[in-house]
Image: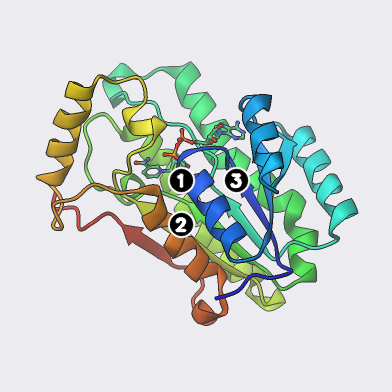
Amino acid sequence: MSFNGKVVVVTGGTKGIGRAISEKFKSLGANVIILYNSSDNIARELEEKGFLTIKCDVSKRSQVKKAAEIVAEKYDKVDVLVNNAGIWYLFSFEEFDEEKYEKMMKINLDGTIYVTYEFLPLIKKSKGVIINMASNAGLGTSAIGNTFYSITKAGIIILTRRLAYELGKYGIRVNAVAPGWVETDMTIGGKSAEEIEKLRQWFKDRTMLHTTGKPEYIANIVSFLASEDSTYITGQIIVADGGRID
Ligand code: NAD
């Protein structure tokens, strides 16, 4: 599998799953552009490693538009767009927190829409591929208190299906990956070793393979979905959760 000469845009690629995706594409020869809204130090470090980084909060339409303009100037096409940026707040329906809900919707769902919309002209030029980061939560796999995060991811799932319908005529494929519990800052950040071990065990007990997820597992699926090996796959949601039981 080679991505030599291909232009790949990854949102939220500074750490976790997005970082693993960015590194995978780079190792396969792609020009990788990371849209980030975290620290500039991490961006500098990534630039030194050969990534192009653009500061961009995906929930801000004007920033997304500007990022697309920068990419257009430098490459004039995008072969692969990975809408990975996302946040996770855990609270049940009865604990409804409007501010957190709106922030999640804005980044997870609106951000995916904005980035796809603004980059679409560049993706059309290469009959490219779009891969969205959903979650098994968006398919209703149970997790206590996941209601509103699940709604944002369910939105991404239907968006993926709709985009596949609408963009197929341009030769653009659109798929999503729905990971289960992957160990990143999102799931274990700020927790003690003891808490992490407890969580690991909880998920292992609810997973057919009795293991938790690693960012690399998801990156491998994303690169497959971006490659010619998956040329007849579109509108699909690939669940990668080790076989969640409940
Ligand atoms: P993470 O917190 O390690 O990384 C998230 C990335 O998104 C970071 O780089 C962060 O800076 C970026 N980001 C957040 N808000 C942004 C914004 N407004 N604009 C631009 N970038 C922004 O989390 P992760 O676990 O690597 O999650 C990556 C994606 O995978 C998310 O969409 C998440 O919902 C999804 N996911 C994660 C898991 C899991 O168990 N970790 C499971 C299912 C789905």
With 51 as the anchor, is 154 left or right in this view?
left
Residue 196 spot, x, y in % from top left: 22, 28
Residue at the disc numbered 3 = 112
As drawn, 119 above or below 225: above
- Residue farthest front in this picture: 48
Give me the residue at 48% from left, 56% from top.
Answer: 158
Q: Identify the amino acid type marked 3.
A: Thr
The answer to whether one can see residue 150 in this image is: yes
Q: Is mark 1 within 8 Å of ligand 1?
A: yes
- Residue farthest right in this picture: 73
Residue 138 spot, x, y in % from top left: 36, 47
Question: Residues under labels 2 and 3: Cα distance?
Answer: 18 Å
Give me the residue at 29% from left, 21% from top.
Answer: 191
With 16 as the anchor, is 227 left or right in this view?
right
How crowded pointer 1 is (Cα within 10 Å; few <14, some 14-19, many 20+) is rated as many
Mark earlier in primary sequence (1, 2): 1
> Which element carries disc 3, helix, strand or loop?
helix
Front disc: 3 or 1: 1
Tag of residue 17: 1
